[in-house]
Amino acid sequence: MTTRLLNGYRTNNFGMDSSPKSNHKFSEDSIQNLLNEIAADLNHLHEKYPMLKETPRERTGNISSPKKVKLSASASANTNIDVKTKRKSKKFKNKSMGHLVPVAINVERDAYLSQLLNLYQTRCMVANKNRKIFTISNGYDALRDALLQRGWVEKVHPTAIAKYSMFSYKQLLQCAERGNEYERTLMSKIVEKYPAYFVWQVRTREMVFPEAAPYRNRIRSRRRLRFTSKIGLTNCAEMETWYRRDNDTILNYPRIHKLHQDYKEWNYFLKDYRQTQCRSLLTYILNNVKNASNLYDNINGTVPSTTLDFALISLKEEIRQFERLHDDFKSELDENDWEVFLNYSNKIIHYKMKLKMNSRELFERIRIAKMLFKQLLKKKPNLRWDGYHNLWIVKPGNSSRGIGIYVLQDLESIYEFTKKDLVLNYIVQKYIERPLIIYGSKFDIRMYMLLTINDKCLSVWLYHDCYLRFSTQEFSLTDLREEVHLTNNSVQKRYKIDERRDERLPTQNMWSLHQFKSYLRSIEVNGSDSIWENRVFPGFVKNLTGIVNTSVEDIEFVNNSFELYGLLVYALASDFHFDENSAPDLLTSTMVTKIFAQV
């Protein structure tokens, strides 16, 4: 067998002097090639003499200590393996195997181990010089594998390799194979004294290796405008109004109220809820005008005509109040009449009771309602997302993955729900009653955005690919179960697909972008990609720019900071609404996400 020695190093019978000649340079590829060659020779030696491989006995829970092998634990490039073995003859007997092994073979094995250690050390030295040492906290195997494939060396947290770290260098070298835990522990021991230059850590952990200015997956910002939380995103939405007045951004979002703050915010929500109920009644009337005979009965009608007049007055006041935004406004509607209106309007919408009026009176009010809606939608275009059910989605301010989210309708239910646990900081948001649905089911679009900070400049990167996530149920505004309305994979994986759901939808509840584009082509007249290219994707860019712009004043500009965000895009009939979360889960639960993670 030919012994391969690393060019530029001196050797002796038992090991290698690992001091390289100053004029020799190593590349990552050449080092890895040598590692592979020496590892192959060592494996051949172990196949010929299997008793040489002293594998730690993990299966029994016993860890064998080295047999009088002295090994310097230094992680520097000057580490030598000094083998001191007492020998009574030129051969020694392995008691467990009952075979005689020549001493020369044992020494040859140690020489190979010495070469391997020197190569691993050199590889780590080159990685440190090129700033290619990384550390990742918990999971994210797709990211870890991508860095390793690019020649990076991992600095593993000690707790992640605790059961291997007690092994000696010699034991680790004998068991090290490409990518296994022994090699991972060995490399981590060698780079112990080096800093990491790429840090992927959880937000709550303290900043590590600040002196090395590593690329770090955390952009620090104050909570007020941290758009990864629902409360922070709500604050950004409120701030964005000022940017919109300067025509800098466009951010479309449903109305939001922070009910955890004070009674003043509750009063804002109460006013919004009441106005929404007025518009809901008028929308219901307009939607059913073709069957107007089901709306009125001048003789047997049970709902007074003043109910419709009340809603029209509210609509007029809403328009007037928007035009006089900074002036004091006094409503002509009596506070005590609201309870009566809410009761009667619900009887019309949900119980199909009829108005006590004739057809002429009804159509005159319909004419006025159409005129008022036309004026109001020019001022508040997002109102076109509303239907007539007056549904609201209630969310804990700092939760994710659909936890604690409910769709509610009754005002009293919303109040009781949000006040039962003030610690959760509930927000309430107008539910989108007119979403874009595909084959009868609700969906959202999962995208990824990257923010980077370099030279005090904040850059926004939007990944061109995305995928869709479907509900397992048919969409319905009368069925308020979470599996109908929450499309998070963490929610939908708990439910079986409804037998009534369209068979054209995927069994894994996910579509790739290619499949979505095919669907868009099928519903467009000319069958091109113009909907996606000219409308959908540009809409994403404008909305995300609006979100980021509003948060800039609260961001700490630290060089080499970056953060990956998962975006949940709720597709509407004409626009899009975003939710964001930081450090998104990169696990691959379906074929669609598997392909996506590999990219």
Image (cartoon, rainbow, N blue to C red):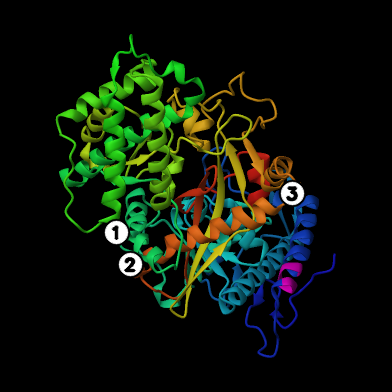
In 3D space, how far apart are the residues under numbered discs 3 and 1 (Cα atoms)? 63 Å
Q: Say whether residue 31 is magenta.
A: yes
Residue 173 appears at what percent x and percent y? 63, 60
Type of residue at label 2? Asp
Cα distance, mark 2 to mark 1?
A: 8 Å
Under circle 1, the secondary element is helix
As drawn, the label of residue 224 is 1
Taking the view exactly as shown, the residue that stands out farthest to the right is: 1
Q: Which residue is mark 2?
A: 554
Tally the marks.
Answer: 3
Say which of 225 and 314 sits in front: 314
Q: Is residue 156 visible?
A: no
Left or right: 174 in relation to 394: right
Q: Earlier in the sequence, mark 2 or mark 3?
A: 3
Residue 152 image-quadrant placement: bottom right
Other-residue count near label 1 (Cα within 10 Å), few / some / many at <14 / 14–19 / ≥20: some
The vertical placement of 53 against 61, above or below, is: below
Cβ atoms at labels 3 and 1 below 8 Å apart: no
Q: Nearer the viewer, residue 41 or 206?
A: 206
The residue labelled by disc 3 is 50
Q: CA distance from mark 2 to mark 3?
A: 62 Å
On the rendered image, what quadrant is the C terminus found in? bottom right
User: Where are the magenta residues, as a range?
Assistant: 29-33
* Mark positioned earlier in the residue sequence (2 or 1): 1
Amino acid on which the number 1 mark rests in the picture: Arg
Q: Nearer the viewer, residue 440 or 165?
A: 440
Nearer the viewer's eye, disc 3 or disc 1? 1
- Asked if disc 2 and disc 1 are in contact, CB closer than 8 Å, the reply is yes
Q: Is residue 392 left or right of residue 145?
A: left
